[in-house]
Image (cartoon, grey):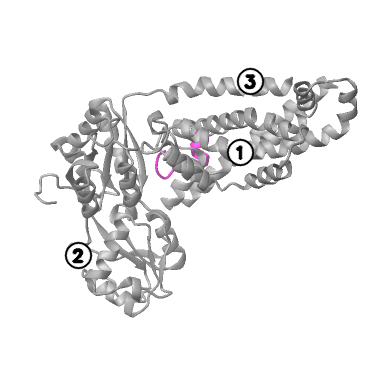
Amino acid sequence: MLTRRIVIAIGAIALLTASPALAQDKSIVVASTTSTQDSGLFGHILPLFKAKTGIDVKVVSQGTGQAIDTGRRGDADVLFVHAKSQEEKFVADGFGVKRFPVMYNDFVLIGPKSDPAGIKGGTDAIKAFTALKDKAAVFISRGDKSGTHAAELDLWKAASIDIAKDKGAWYREIGQGMGAALNTASASNAYVLSDRATWLSFKNRGDLEILVAGDQRMFNQYGVMLVNPAKHPHVKQDLGQALVDWLISAEGQKAIADYKVGGEQLFFPNATVPGA
Amino acid sequence: MPDQASALQLVLSGDPALFAIVRLSLLVSLSAVVCAALIGLPFGALVALTRFPGRAGVIVVLNALMGLPPVVVGLAVYLLLSRSGPLGSWGLLFTPAAMIVAQTILITPIIAALSRQTIEDLWLEYRDELAAMNVGPAGRIATLVYDARFSLITTLLAGFGRAAAEVGAVIIVGGNIDGFTRTMTTAIALETSKGDLPLALGLGFVLLAIVVAVNAAAWGMKRVGEQYAG
């Protein structure tokens, strides 16, 4: 029975190699956003955290909307995202213990070097978004209820544009992550709103560059919170809180500030700023 | 994986992260093939050899389920294994075990449907002989599966190919966690989203090479087995 022998051999190998991978160890699951992962921030700070505490952090990176849902279902111990109002609702609904501000970076409006909407060099997001709509310049929207998507919708609103009503063929919702949105914009020479961190570590830029940045309204605040053990008793309270405490400690904040890509600081710690 | 590295460099330098990913991909997909074979082969044989009302319907559904969309399987398993789901207390979501479960569900119909066809064709050939020898149902299944074993390897390879190539299910139930649930396909999806298209494509070739290697190994075993058999 050669077939059976092969099957048994494969099964035995699978079981032998599976056991260490499946073993429960000192680890937590963090639901976070694509920007923190893709930018390489976690790759820089989590080894420091592990060296200090011995805790393995498993990061599931999703859009903020999906990450919050993961936390709500109890599938993560800690939530590390960037959509303040949704985070506050998450805590108010009893799913999170307490939200702590951690750091910010900013959104940048990316577009083709040829700049058909003529917004290059501006620092006023309202002016830029109004011009995009008036010129019907092709714009790629995340359309996935992520933190960046929420920020984009807020900017249209601030520019007194009802995008649900005013959008035409030029406004393209792709329903995907930041990387996919940048790839799409790069392929179609379109405008797109991105967090600066993802943009700086993004490689397939094509003809795109930063056109508008620096508006206060484009600040992107990150918060961290422990999923409420009162709702989900299996949440690893002590290990999860250890990560939250470390991120907002002087040491964690310094680790965040020290992370640079091409000499440029990506995230600015602000755990001590009230109301952030 | 370090930045700015090409897939070729990663392979040649024996990058430990890449090898951990390859190892996990093989572990998950081969385990899923084993589980699916344990369910699908006997089930396919049973359907092939028995006559019952609604049999045609079962065969049509089985054949149709070969086209199960991975993302739907992933979502269903996600909802099942989520802490808020019926099996949440097992704590399996975002682990390799969850990925094996999802891929097993995905490929069991493929193995069951293809083995049903193979065994049924053989059954037509052997029926009179087995009936004359007065072999019982269990003995018939064992005889037919054994005699069809070389064709059934191809069936298992079809299941393996499907499992190794899919990204929709494993990325949902595994979460693409670095060093824990990242497979070849989810790594390719990640590098694509980071805009590192050359690395993503390079990893794609690595995946292709692995699938070819597994098929070559199966082919070799089949040849050796055929020589001994006969």
State which chain disc 3 sits on. A
The chain carrying label 1 is: B
Query: Considering the numbered disc 2 on the image, is that residue within a helix, a strand or a loop?
Result: loop
Closer to us: mark 3 or mark 1?
A: 1
Residue lying furthest bottom:
A134
The relative height of residue A240 versus residue A105 in the rendered view (above or below) is: above
Q: Which residue lies under the disc numbered 2?
A: A215
Q: Secondary structure at mark 1?
A: helix
Q: Residues in magenta?
A: B1-13
**Which one is nearer the viewer's eye here, A58 or A144?**
A144
User: Which image quadrant: the N terminus of chain A?
Assistant: top right
Bin the neighbour count of mark 2 within 10 Å (Cα to Cα): few under 14, some 14-19, many 20 and up: some
Tell me if residue A222 comes above or below residue A154 in the rendering.
above
Q: Amino acid at mark 2?
A: Asp
* Residue B15 visible: no
Q: Are marks 2 and 1 on the same chain?
A: no
Q: Residue at x 19, y 34 (%)?
A: A246
Distance between the Cα atoms at labels 2 and 3? Answer: 63 Å
Q: How many marks?
A: 3
Q: Is residue A231 above or below residue A22?
A: below
Q: Are marks 2 and 3 on the same chain?
A: yes
Quarter holding residue B4: top left
Task: Tell me if mark 3 has few (under 14), some (14-19) or many (20+) residues whose alpha carbon lies within 10 angstroms of its own.
Answer: few
Residue B107 tag number: 1
